[in-house]
Amino acid sequence: MYKTDLPIDTREEAAILARKNREAQRQSRIFDARTRQIGVDVEALAKQKEEKRMRQQAEDERNRAYDADMLKQAQICTLLDERQKKDLKQVNKQLNAFRLEQQ
């Protein structure tokens, strides 16, 4: 009837052998406890944490510098405003004195 013991084609045999080899390599990679890494990379997380801390520190320093500059500018504005009021008061006083003397 049917002949089941016929030789397999060489291409099919090569394909089957290649699949078996790939599967064996995959299993050796997956099931090898020495090369497999499960979990988190602690060093990378520590590095990311340090980088974030450094960025935050730089941002805080920049914000403190901006705050100090803002306070300095506010003091200057206050002094200029006081000087302007003083000068205006002086001019008004001189104007009134002139009016009293000349009129």
Image (spheres, rainbow, N blue to C red):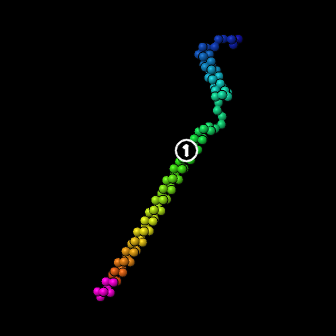
Query: Is residue 37 left or right of 102 when viewed as pictured?
Result: right
Q: Nearer the viewer, residue 79 or 11?
A: 79
Q: Residue at x 47, y 62 (%)?
A: 71
Residue 91 belongs to magenta span: no
Query: Is residue 33 left or right of 56 when viewed as pictured?
Result: right
Residue 93's place in the image compared with 56, above or below, is: below
Residue that sits furthest to the left in the current view: 102
Residue at image mark 1: 51
Tell me which segment is drawn in magenta.
Answer: 97-103
Q: Position of residue 58 (x, y in %)?
A: 51, 50
Residue that sits furthest to the right in the current view: 1
Q: Position of residue 46 (x, y in %)?
A: 60, 41
**Where on the picture, by quarter, is residue 80?**
bottom left
Residue 100 belongs to magenta span: yes
Q: Residue at x 64, y 20 (%)?
A: 20
Dot 1, how many residues are within 10 Å of its Cα: few (below 14), some (14-19), or many (20+)? few
Q: Nearer the viewer, residue 64 or 51?
A: 64
Q: Position of residue 34 (x, y in %)?
A: 66, 28
